[in-house]
Structures are given as C-alpha cells and as structure tokens.
Image (cartoon, helix red, strand yellow):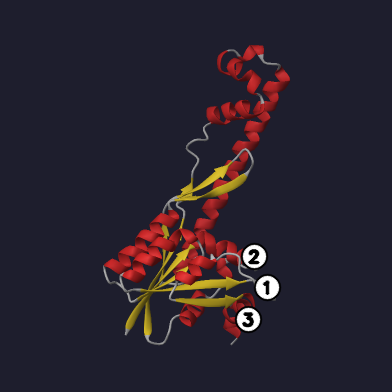
Amino acid sequence: MKKAIILIDGANLFYGLRSMNLLEKDINWNYLFNSIISTDHELIRTYWFRPQKILDSNYTAANIRNQIVNKKHHAHLNNYKNDKTKIPAAILNQIEADAILAENWLKGEKIKFSQIEYNYDQLGLEFGDIEFVKIGIVKVNPYSQEYVGEKGVDIALAVKMIALSVEKRCDKIILISGDYDYAEAIKFVKNNMTKVHLVKLHTGQPPKNKSVSRDLAILADQVIDIYESELKSKFAKGVVLQQ
C-alpha cells in the first residue's frame, strides 16, 4: 500500500478554523484525516508545525522604556538616557504607565501561549498519529499589543517536505496550508516524483476561501476542498460521536 503523510501549517489552519468559529479541539481529526486519504494510501503520520515560544528577549524593562521614549517622547530621549531630572514628572509618569501596560500585555500573552501549548499537548495525546513540531518563534509588538507574525515555522515545514521526498519516506504529501511561500518546496517535491495534495478550507455560504493562494493551488497535483458545513456536520466531535 502507498504511504501518505500530512503536513500542517498550524497558524494557517488556526485562522482558517477561526473564520468558521471553530477551534482545533472541536474537530475529530481521525475522521477528518481518514476522509482525505484515498483508499490506496495509508496515513503514516501527521506533522503539525507551530511556534515554540513568543520572542521576548528584546523586551527587557530598559528596552521597553527606551523604545517608548524614542517613539512618543523623542525630544526627551537624550535626557532620559543621561539625566532624567530634566524631564517633567508628568512625562516620566506617562512613560512608566505605558511601559507597565506593555509589560503586562506581554506577560499575559506568554501565559496564554502556555495554556495553548497545554491544549495542543492534549490533542497529541488524544490523536496518537499527530506529532507536533514546535519550532520557530511568534513575533509580537507589546506597544501596539498585537501579533506581528511567525518566524522559522514555514522554513521548517518546507525542509520537512523536501526531506520526506528525498528520503522516499512517502508517496504523497498532503499539505494543509495556503501560504505561497511553500511554492518552491512543492515544485521540488513534484520534480522528485512525490505527489502533493493541497487542502483548501471554504468558509460560509456561498463558500469562500481566503487562506489558499490561487497560484499555490495550481501547483498542487490535487486540491482537496473542505467546506465549513462539512466540518460542522461531519467532523465536529459532538456530531461524529452521535453517528
């Protein structure tokens, strides 16, 4: 029997599910994965890529305060570094208040990240064929209190895709992601005679897809369409358990 491996870009999947008001824990992944594996293939393993930690090494107490002064009170930057007594008390108080807000937000996000890690570990225990690959970092901006993006995750997934093909570990790779950054890896894998199928999530009615690049879909050997109505009627945990 031919072998298939699923590779998941965790961030891409997270946002795709969130657009449907779903979380990863809401899905029976065994049912879903089996539905996208053809009868002549055996699913060997699923590699689910996600960041290892929030990048916070640049956000020391001193760096946070210096950045706030540089961005919001640039005229006082020299005095802040050399003689704070020359800065009005109201300005110093505002700098400190903004710094505490940034520090508290960052602390809260690290706690959330830790809680999310626990949830993924539970998924790994529940679905034994899933291996979570924790690599790379999440970039955040505590001043604007927002996530900037991930670094290192997509590279690790692309390297894994290429390695699986070069080492002849499988006959088919099913990619759950729509990021065009994987285009070159897909081309390489196909040239190495490994099939690449791409999962495309469709939201709403009429169905819409915003997470998969059209050019990426064209590169794949096959596109597997999964619709929101299908996820909720066939693959949501509560629904499946009642069948």
**Closer to the eye: label 3 or 1:** 1
Residue 36, image x and y in percent? 47, 80
Residue drawn at x 35%, y 68% as measured from the top left: 189
How far is disc 3 from disc 2 in space, using C-alphas?
16 Å
The answer to whether residue 205 is left or right of residue 49 is: right
Q: Quadrant of the N terminus?
A: bottom left
Pointer 3 residue: 233
Q: Nearer the viewer, residue 182 or 167?
A: 182
Q: Secondary structure at mark 2?
A: loop
Residue 203, image x and y in percent? 64, 71
Q: Most extreme residue toward the left, as rendered? A: 167
Identify which amino acid the numbered label 2 is placed on.
Answer: Ser
In the image, residue 61 sits, relative to residue 232, either above or below, namely: above
Identify which amino acid the numbered label 1 is placed on.
Answer: Gly
Residue drawn at x 64%, y 41% as measured from the top left: 144
| Snapshot quadrant of residue 159 | bottom left
Residue drawn at x 48%, y 77% as measured from the top left: 30
- The tag on residue 19 is 2
Residue drawn at x 56%, y 68% as measured from the top left: 25
Q: Callout 1 environment at 10 Å: few (<14), some (14 to 19), or many (20+)?
A: few
How far is disc 1 from disc 2 in space, using C-alphas?
9 Å
Mark earlier in primary sequence (3, 2): 2
In the image, residue 58 sits, relative to residue 189, either above or below, namely: above
